[in-house]
Amino acid sequence: MIRTLGLLLGACGLAAQLGACAAMSGGSAVPSTFFTAAQASRGERRFNQLCADCHRNVEITRSWFSGRVHQTAGDLMTVMSLTMPESNPGGLSADQYADILAFLLRMNNYPDGEEELPADPALLANVPIPAP
Ligand code: HEC
């Protein structure tokens, strides 16, 4: 329940920054602006190519999204884009990291929608990763 509330607040915060929050007040409580399905699929392909050798699902869904180490998607983006992949830190473009982050969010049941996830960590700071 707390988790759901966190997601809703986070979605509205992000959407407000993107100018789309009004779209959510029309009855449906389901936020629709975290990332697009196509973006998450691009991220999934890239993750499988570049990251999956070292990182398994259990990490993605438990450890990275436990809310303990990384409290927002922005924190996760910063760590990822400065230190990963291990052999080539910072080697991807900001958009490519955003695609991977979209995939990680999808793996953790965050909702997809019409807007692509922005690569800007400042905007991503409004997407919380609540502690369970
Ligand atoms: C060669 C192995 C390797 C590859 C490839 C790799 N990583 Fe890592 N990654 C690590 C290691 C080792 C750590 C440090 C683990 C730790 O300290 O908990 C780490 C840590 C991380 C963390 C931080 C975890 C945390 O909780 O602080 C994230 C996020 C991450 N990797 C994402 C990625 C992504 C995304 C990619 C692909 C672009 C990638 N990694 C590719 C080995 C790898």
Image (tube, rainbow, N blue to C red):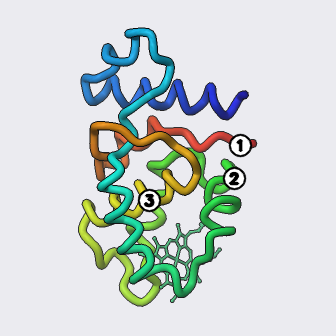
- Identify the mark nearer the N-term, 3 or 1: 3
Residue at the spot x=24%, y=68% of the render?
93
Label for residue 104?
none
Residue on which disc 3 sits? 103
- Identify the mark nearer the N-term, 3 or 2: 2
Residue 43 vs residue 17, the one in the foreground: 43
Looking at the picture, does residue 113 appear above or below residue 24?
below
The Cα–Cα distance between marks 2 and 1, rounded to whole angstroms, is 6 Å
| Contact (Cβ within 8 Å) of mark 2 with mark 1 | yes
Query: Image quadrant for the N terminus?
Result: top right
| Contact (Cβ within 8 Å) of mark 3 with mark 2 | no
Residue at the spot x=47%, y=40% of the render?
111
Question: Is label 2 in a helix, a strand or a loop?
Answer: loop
Residue at the spot x=43%, y=74% of the render?
47
Residue 124: x and y in percent read 40, 43
The Cα–Cα distance between marks 3 and 1, rounded to whole angstroms, is 20 Å
Question: Is label 1 in a helix, a strand or a loop?
Answer: loop
Residue on which disc 2 sits? 66
Residue 69: x and y in percent read 65, 56
Q: Amino acid at mark 3?
A: Phe
Q: Is residue 125 left or right of residue 39?
A: right
Question: Is label 3 in a helix, a strand or a loop?
Answer: helix
